[in-house]
Image (cartoon, rainbow, N blue to C red):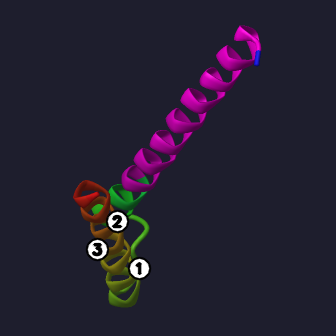
Amino acid sequence: MSEAVQSMEQQLLEKSNSLMELEQKYKVMKMAKSLEGGEVDNNKDLKFKDKQMVREIDKCIALLNK
């Protein structure tokens, strides 16, 4: 494989990782924003949001344990 191809693959990998990180940050920010007030209309929505946060935390813990 040529150096140019390897360099491009490395850049693609870095961009992919960056995108995943930004998507995670967006999810967390969106969840936090919804819990601040405006978007949560009832207890059912709040419970759903709580369960989502717990799942995200569980995923993070699983990644840390690897």
- What residue sits right under mark 1 in the picture? 41
What is the secondary structure assignment of the residue under circle 1? Answer: loop
Q: Magenta region, mostly helix, strand or loop?
A: helix
> Residue 3 falls in which quadrant of the image?
top right
Query: Marks 1 and 2: in contact by CB < 8 Å?
Result: no
With 5 as the anchor, is 20 left or right in this view? Answer: left
Residue 23 coordinates in the image, percent (x, y): 51, 47
Amino acid of disc 2:
Lys
Q: Which of the pair 58/43 is nearer the observer?
A: 58
- What residue sits right under mark 3 in the picture? 54
Residue 55 coordinates in the image, percent (x, y): 35, 73
Residue 2 coordinates in the image, percent (x, y): 76, 12
Query: Marks 1 and 3: in contact by CB < 8 Å?
Result: no
Q: Which of the pair 23/46 is nearer the observer?
A: 23
Where the C terminus falls, by quadrant?
Answer: bottom left
Query: Which range is magenta?
Result: 2-29
